Amino acid sequence: MSVEVCEVEFGQNTITFDLVRRERKTLSISVHPDLAVEVFAPIDATFDKIAEKVRKRAPWIQKQLKYFAQFQPRTPKRSYVAGETHLYLGRQYKLKVAPHIQNSVKMFRGQIMVNSTKPRSKEHTRELVRDWMLKRARIKFAERLEICRGRFADPEAVVPTGLVIRDLSQRWGSMTARGNLVLNRSLIGAATDSIDYVITHELCHIEHPHHGTAFFEHLGRVMPDWERRKTKLERQLA
């Protein structure tokens, strides 16, 4: 059995899903309350056939995603103007923008201080803040990855091939078939214990690629309070 993260275009939308190959004759699709989509396919099924099936079921998939999404609170879209707040490691920080001959971003007395050569440009401020958040995410996620590996009986058995940080529309993280740990860049806004939940969840996928009983038993042993952490994450960032 193998698992890989795949994408299929449908109109103006992209459907991201976990492709799970098993010894089976038919293909099935599941949509979970955490907005994860799983496609279970025969080992010898071609991707073209799988993509065709996903596109055919796309209206149903989107309907299910929309249904589950209504139960998740929404964080207001950021405008990147002075005075609004932004989450960083679970705390709210007020954004302050000041004119300057050089661009820079730093934390200062409970604020995210942006020195900008274009202080009136919201798009420029957005780019500066997102770049800064990404740099912080690379450092913090790498630190938490090492700590989370220490939770396992054999830390050397849960070493991902690499750590990838990118925008994900429907999930907080994933473990690719090649062993890359992919984390949503927005996760840097979550509290540390919630970040640890996502990383630990994905590390469990190294041994258990799918969300079966064995997976959740393993996760429960490694992180007994994972459900509390998951709920906290969804309430804070969803």
Image (spheres, rainbow, N blue to C red):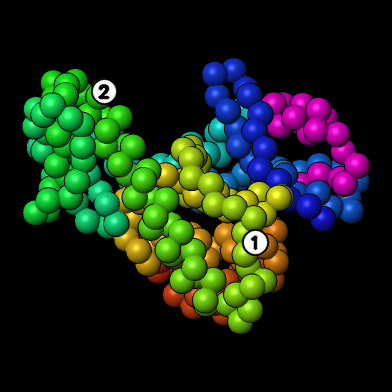
Distance from the alpha carbon under mark 2 to that under mark 1: 37 Å
Q: Which residue is painted at 13% across and 26% down in the image?
A: 101
State the mark number for residue 185: none
Lateral position of residue 24 relative to residue 127, left or right: right
Q: Which residue is painted at 16% across and 37% down in the image?
A: 114
Type of amino acid at the residue the image marks with label 2:
Glu
Which is more toward the observer, 90 or 55? 90
Q: Which residues are magenta?
A: 40-57
- Say few, some or many: other residues with alpha carbon within 10 Å of mark 1 (under 14 / 14 to 19 / 20 or more): many
Q: Is residue 176 highlighted in magenta?
A: no
Which is more toward the observer, 112 or 211? 112
Lateral position of residue 97 relative to residue 236, left or right: left
State the mark number for residue 123: 2
Q: Which residue is mark 1?
A: 205
Q: Earlier in the sequence, mark 2 or mark 1?
A: 2
When asked about the image quadrant of residue 156, the answer is bottom right
Type of amino acid at the residue the image marks with label 1:
His
